[in-house]
Image (tube, rainbow, N blue to C red):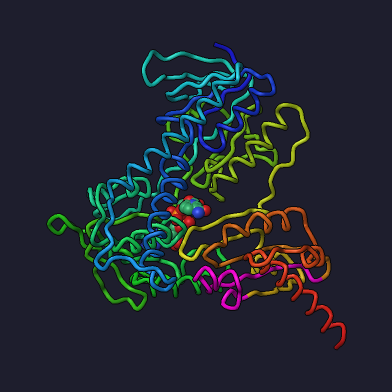
Amino acid sequence: MKVDFLVIGGGPGGTPAAMALASAGRRVLLVEKGAGLGGTCLFEGCIPSKILRESARRLQDIRRAQEFGLQIPAGEIGVDWGAIMKRKAAILRGRAEGALQRARQIPTLSVQFGSAALLGPRRARITPRDGTPEDVEFGSAIITTGSVPNLLPVTGVDLPQVLTSEQVLEIDHLPKRLAVIGAGPIGVEMAQILAAFGTRVTLLEAGPRILAPVDEEIALALEDHIRRQGIALELGARIAAIVRDGDEVRMQYRDAAGTQREAQAEFVLEATGRRPNVDGLGLEHTAVRHDRHGVKVDAKLETDEPGIYAVGDVLGHPMFAHWATAQALALAAHLAGRAARFPAPAVNTAVIFSIPVVGIAGLTETEARSAGHAVGVARYDYRADARAQVSGHAEGFLKLVYDQSSRAVLGVHVLADDAASLLGEGALAVGAGIAVETLAAAIHPHPTLSESIGTAAREALAARASSARR
Ligand code: NAI
């Protein structure tokens, strides 16, 4: 077989890249090892965790029903874990089928379920899930094989009670007690989701605070929410071992003061990062360079092997589905001979679905200072916000980071129940380098959380006016 493009991996990077190239008339073979198109995000990451979170958040709201003048019968509100898992499976199946149907409508795109390994710079062996291996010649290839969980080199990490972030989404019952190692996005999200369902959670983080790359004030405020939720958060914890204790396990660790401690748990979730997935790809038969941080590419996502490109988690941080898609679409446009704008790291947007949600667009205050900007910061407090009060979530704040000389918005950072809804405007403001004056002049509808962006921008104008008067 001969194709123009071989795309290895059908996640949020590979699928849009393959579809865009095939839609431009190129012959594309997309090879996916998993059960369907969608990758880690759809099957083992963003989407299933958000489905569990949705049930958890609704449960929290139902428990507050009286505050909203609603009466619900006395007694414990039940959680049907099996029904939640069925709902999750149905949504995932529907999304995977939808993606495959859309792919199959493009005549020059073939989707093969199986694995691909490079034999050389222009040749690969495709081993279908059911069938005999076949070699394919390609003009160019895109490696978009994602990432896999990082496992700690700690005694007991191989016990069946120790789960990866992928396995925790498949548990068949709600555990009574859970220990989570690592307070990055995965650890924080899963700790809060399971705690909302009633699991007693211990969250252990080696660093001095949670969510290291997030704005410090936001991370510290979220730590308060986590503790108020009843989660035992231990910062500066050093894991020593995980030992079996009947059906359960004991997590042995030293706390920040060096005292030996233990946390009993039914399961331990290992959420200590992910590493690029390059195993079995045959990169050694090419000039593609990689290390534990990922595959090395230039500004146009080409590896050291001309004609072989890579996008998404396999490049290392940042590991976000939307980042992989943005890279994939830019690369596909470039390879199809159209003008392409490759995404710039400073414009990265992310939402951490903690409770409340953390929204990030662009540079934090600290990053902006290190980059040499004359940083201005305008704030907005949701405690006094109409929409936040109405919704019963009058908490959190927004920070608008801007350059005092150029007036361009550099970052929008939010902690709020509905922070996710603000990020589109934040991403646009940062990506287009919109001035605080322009944001301040836009009419943000009342009563919505988006008013916080307009109000913060007006605060930035007021700060300039008062410094001019001085
Ligand atoms: P991470 O690398 O972001 O965080 C891992 C955390 O574990 C860090 O805080 C680290 O200090 C801690 N840690 C490492 N070794 C430890 C030890 N021995 N004991 C205690 N703590 C230890 O990785 P995470 O959360 O697993 O996420 C993986 C990737 O997936 C990240 O790139 C993340 O951005 C992405 N992701 C994004 C989400 C979102 O945008 N909503 C949600 C989930 C994941």
Q: Residue sitting at 47 percent across and 47 percent down?
A: 46
In magenta segment, residue 306 = no
Q: Residue sitting at 76 percent across and 64 percent down?
A: 443
Q: Is residue 141 left or right of residue 148?
A: right
- Write down the region rendered in magenta: 381-404
In the current view of this chain or complex, which residue is farthest to the top?
Answer: 1
Name the foreground residue: 4 vs 239: 4
The quarter of the picture where the N terminus appears is top right
Give residue 250's quadrant in the image.
bottom left
Q: Residue sitting at 38 percent across and 52 percent down?
A: 52
In magenta segment, residue 393 = yes
In the current view of this chain or complex, which residue is farthest to the right?
Answer: 469
Name the foreground residue: 449 vs 293: 449
Question: Residue 304's spot in the image, x, y percent?
Answer: 63, 34
Tally of marks: 0
Q: Is residue 367 left or right of residue 440?
A: left
Question: Residue 384's spot in the image, x, y percent?
Answer: 60, 78
